Image: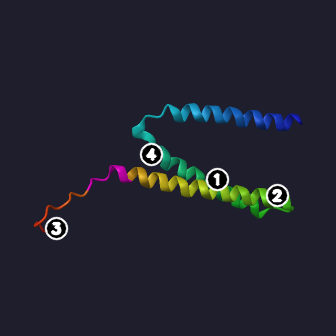
Amino acid sequence: MSNELIGYLTTFVLAAFVGFEVISKVPTILHTPLMSGSNAIHGIILVGAIAIAMRATGPLQLTVGFLAVLLATINVVGGFVVTDRMLEMFKPRQQQNKPGESAQ
């Protein structure tokens, strides 16, 4: 392994640990704004993945670029689905009408 690859792997592992620690300390009430912010970041990542994939010259680069675009797209869509479900929890529930009453 080259020193450059070891440096990249070290940075990745440290970022994963720091990210986990930061996210695990977020109070429940702040999860929705945090998800909205992370969706914006994932959108930027998707644009970057598309830009990188467009410059691919070989089959390996094209495969990795396609994989990056695919995973970023799944991440963006999943983030919006989760955010939508979380926001649904805060909407007031509809009251059910009793028999004989008309809906207003």
Asked which quadrant contains residue 63, the reply is: bottom right
Q: Which mark is residue 64?
A: none
Of the numbered discs 3 and 2, the one sitting upstream in the chain is: 2
Q: Which mark is residue 103?
A: 3
Residue at left offset 65%, top offset 36%: 16
Label 4 sits on residue:
33
Label 2 sits on residue:
61
Is 36 left, or right, of 20 in this rendering?
left
Mark 3–mark 2 Cα distance, whole angstroms, equals: 60 Å
* Mark 3 neighbour class, 10 Å CA radius: few under 14, some 14 to 19, many 20 or more: few
Amino acid at dot 2? Gln
What quarter of the picture does the C terminus occupy?
Answer: bottom left
Of the numbered discs 2 and 1, the one sitting upstream in the chain is: 1
* Mark 2 neighbour class, 10 Å CA radius: few under 14, some 14 to 19, many 20 or more: some
Amino acid at dot 1? Ile
Which region of the structure is painted magenta?
A: 88-93
Q: Secondary structure at mark 1?
A: helix
